[in-house]
Image (tube, rainbow, N blue to C red):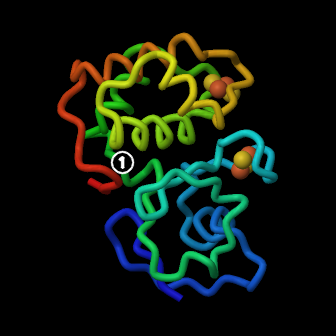
Amino acid sequence: MHLHVNGRSREVHPASDASLLTVLRDELQLTGTKEGCDRGECGACTVLVDGRPVYACLTLAVAVDDATIVTVEGLGSNAAPHPVQAAFAALDAAQCGFCTPGQVVSACALLARNAAPTEAEIRDAMSGNLCRCGTYPKIIAAIQAAARGEFGALPVAGSAR
Ligand code: FES
Ligand code: FES
């Protein structure tokens, strides 16, 4: 089967019961996507599938044949980070950082569909991403700063750069 991952077409050979998370991390070595609970509770594994945020641990790889996947690696680079990535870094929106890739992906998905969310809308959209370090105030502040354009213009929904 094929996946279009971060702008590249990739041929992968998953077992019938393999999750998208397993394929991304173990077959494609895209380890930015984290495995937290592995049962759909924490959001650490969030990626975009055809522009929608999903839990990769709960997504069967074979169910997304030919889909367009964007992982945290596809949102930006060290040289040219996505505005949300830049905001998280500049505003210290991570402590241990384990939840951060999923947080960033969910925040990007939110801003792609709602460029000026209220704080309540941010909290609602981010409710599927848990942070054991409790950095929620800084995460919200980073998303608000990115929405205000303080870290550059937001790219087109679901796109990899
Ligand atoms: S690892 Fe997928 S939701 Fe926790
Ligand atoms: S920064 Fe540690 S779990 Fe969120």
Residue type at mark 1 is Leu
- Residue 88's image quarter? top left
Q: Which residue is mark 1?
A: 75
- Residue 76, above or below 11: above
Residue 151 x %, y %? 24, 24
Picture coordinates of residue 69, whole percent (x, y): 45, 64
Element under disc 1: helix
Q: Which residue corresponds to the image point at 43% horizontal and 58% vertical from the top-left?
A: 70
12 with respect to 128 (left or right)? left
Residue under the point 73% across and 39% down: 42
Q: Vertical placement of 42 versus 13: above or below?
A: above
Up the image or down, 114 lies above or below 10; here it is above
Tell me: 80 left or right of 88: left
Query: Total label count?
Result: 1
71 up-or-down from 122: above or below: below
Residue at 62%, 87% in the rendered image: 13
Categorize mark 1 by other alpha carbons within 10 Å: few (<14), some (14-19), many (20+).
many
Is residue 12 toward the left or the right of residue 77 in the image? right
* x, y percent for residue 79: 25, 40
* Rendering coords of residue 16 (x, y %): 74, 85
Instruction: Look at 37% across and 18% down and name the residue there.
Output: 144
